[in-house]
Image (cartoon, coloured by chain):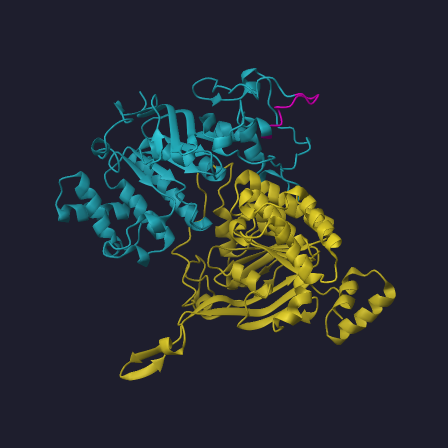
Chain colours: A yellow, B cyan
Amino acid sequence: MSVMSATASVGTQSAENKAAENKAAENKIPATAPLLSIRGLEKHFSLSGDVLEQLKFKGGRVVREQKFVHAINGVDLDIQRGEALCVVGESGCGKSTVARVVMGLLNPTAGEIHYDGERIDQLGAKALLPWRQRMQMIFQNPYASLNPRMTIQQTLEEPIRLHHPTWDYRQVKDKVSEVMTSVGIAPDWGARFGHEFSGGQRQRIAIARALAVDPEFIVADEPISALDVSIQAQVLNLLMDAQQAHNLTYLFITHDLAVVEHFGTRVAVMYLGRVCEVAPTATLFAEPLHPYTRALMSAIPRLEDERPQHLRLEGEVPTPIHLPSGCVFHGRCPHAERRCREEIPRLIATDNGAMVACHGIEEGRIPL
Amino acid sequence: MALLDVNHLDVRFALRRGDVQALRDVCFSLDKGERLGIVGESGAGKSVAAFSLLNLIAKPGYIANGSHIVFDGEELVGLSDRALRRIRGHRMSMIFQDPMMTLNPVLSIGEQMIECLKAHRRISKREARKVALEKLQLAQIPAPEARLDQYPHELSGGMRQRVIIAIALLLDPDIIIADEPTTALDVTIQAEVMALLLDLCEKQDVGLILITHDLGVVSQVTERMLVMYAGRVIEQGPTREIINNPLHPYTQGLIQALPQMATPGSRLNQIPGSMPSLDKLPSGCAFHPRCPFATLDDGRPRPGCRDQVPPLTGADARQVSCHMVAENKPVQADQSAPAKEAH
């Protein structure tokens, strides 16, 4: 079934198309269904240890107390085929957790994840295997994500052997040298170990490992933040080339807005585990709406600035242990009113094609 | 005369396989109240340059003979630790990269500040506490009185970096050396801390040496900048001039590689290859293997680039170390040139 709905959105053959459309209609999924759709996602991490550690003596009685880090609090996102959706935000906003939950590396506390029309967040490791081939991940730190005791050849062969158990030795080897060439690493370097390469080269190898099983969707968690400026450009170019060559869809996690402006088709801005604005990249950079997005954008140091020109925000990001009531941003927002402190804002579509979760924008009391 | 004058600074690390030269012939100066940026990628030697000013180079590193660091008329190279202590933290203070590592976790903020004051001045505890409070206020820390009795773990990263700025200002230094002071912080906090640092330096007429890899930050905060590559200064001059009109091919490449310089969605202008390791420096100009101008149009290597180290040339205000620029050939980044892939 997954294969059929895949052809539905590509729309190659009409007969298959129709069948898939019927199938999609049964599941109430439109023909242009997003590749990945996240609904009401929540992820809480317990801080309290096991049951015995949770017992506290309070007011003469033994009570059980649990504390949670609310990393994601109700995130809805759709990722369309072929786009690069960038998720930006400051540390602790839950952007990496979103990436990990999507990849199935963490189990969500609540909410659903649909990939190509099928719910994948409850699947076990074995049932997930075919999905894992279609979605791959690139991690932030290429010094930690490559196994130091495996040669590059072994590192790249492993996913291929796992997902194509029937392939013979020659096929695997050809595939490895193909992906190595495609990321600009000479195939005869396969016998070397990860530590023999520079940071940029290691990240290329990590990208090659993701590409080795021909995925259609790649989650990249801060793939260039650990690299130097001149190397960042090389790796970004490589990611864009790979997108064109393999028709990839990206979920790109980053804190660097300059990279987002360059790379992303759409941007989702997160704050304290919630999405506060989603918009096409050009729209967001031309006309940021949410007060937090505006502050974030003004804080990027730009070459043409002669002095810092940021909008001042009061206070600091609250801890995700005790979430503020209402809008999570209200404590630092210059436009906060009573409604902001009481009611959680929903993502609402605006005229310019963006979606914003802000009472002030909705009511029109924040000037554009 | 400049307040700080660094001449022919050579820093080496004595390793078993021989000396590795981390800095070669680094020269720069700083006037009173001037803000200087030192820019480069990791391994360029920018932190070593900053650390060597206060001789904070740990063994096996050492400052080689023939290097001169003259501060306010006094030669610092070869000075004893005891004599250096008059200057360290007093007339030149330092802000390090990671605010989590810089503060002592077992002393309250107040104790750390008073300790620092008492080490340099004959001052009563009560007086010292007053000075500490004043500096915390200067660093725009909310509820400064309460902070004095708090411990570092009770403060957020941005607040800790503000405390460190307050400590750096304790003894009214002439120069603050800040080594990537905001790299560990988020963008909005970085903007706040940078604005504060700039504001304080201007108001108190304190000189600033800012080490960073972020060209945006340098352009916002500093008046002059040095660009370093593989242990050498390859370009220096007024910040605005370098950003608007970089002369060295490496500086050009670095600026062109920024995502904000390209049209969204297009390929970025990349510098092929990566910075050479310091113990395997290429001959001649260290940048020549990555330089688009080191090869002539007919594919032959340009004479000079591979066998001669280009000296820093130009008027005092604007210096570049490149054979092309020295020969008055216009160095213009050719954007249509096919970018070579790194191997």
Residue A182 occupies quadrant = top right
Image-based side of A172 in relation to A314, left or right: right
Q: Position of residue A204 (x, y in %)?
A: 61, 46
Q: How many marks?
A: 0
What residue is drawn where x is 46% and y is 17%?
Answer: B315
Q: Residue furthest top?
A: B327
Front-lying residue, B270 or B260 = B270
**Image quarter (top left, top right, bottom left or bottom right) of the N terminus of chain B:** top left
What residue is drawn where x is 53% and y is 33%?
Answer: B276
Q: Position of residue B125 (x, y in %)?
A: 14, 48
Front-lying residue, A137 or B148 = A137
Q: Is residue B291 magenta?
A: yes
Q: Position of residue A160 (x, y in %)?
A: 68, 57
Q: Residue furthest right?
A: A15
Q: Is residue A250 magenta?
A: no
Front-lying residue, A37 or B291 = B291
Image-based side of B122 in relation to A94, left or right: left
Image-based side of A318 in relation to A140, left or right: left
Residue B205 shows in this picture: yes
What residue is drawn where x is 45% and y is 70%?
Answer: A342
B214 relative to A174, above or below: above
Q: Position of residue A265 (x, y in %)?
A: 65, 52
Residue A364 shows in this picture: no
Residue B339 occupies quadrant = top right
- What's the magenta bit mostly, secondary-structure-wise? loop
Q: Residue furthest bottom?
A: A61
A215 relative to B240, above or below: below
B78 relative to A222, above or below: above
B303 relative to B253, above or below: above
**Image quarter (top left, top right, bottom left or bottom right) of the C terminus of chain B:** top right
Image-based side of B179 in relation to A246, left or right: left
Magenta region, residue range: B290-300
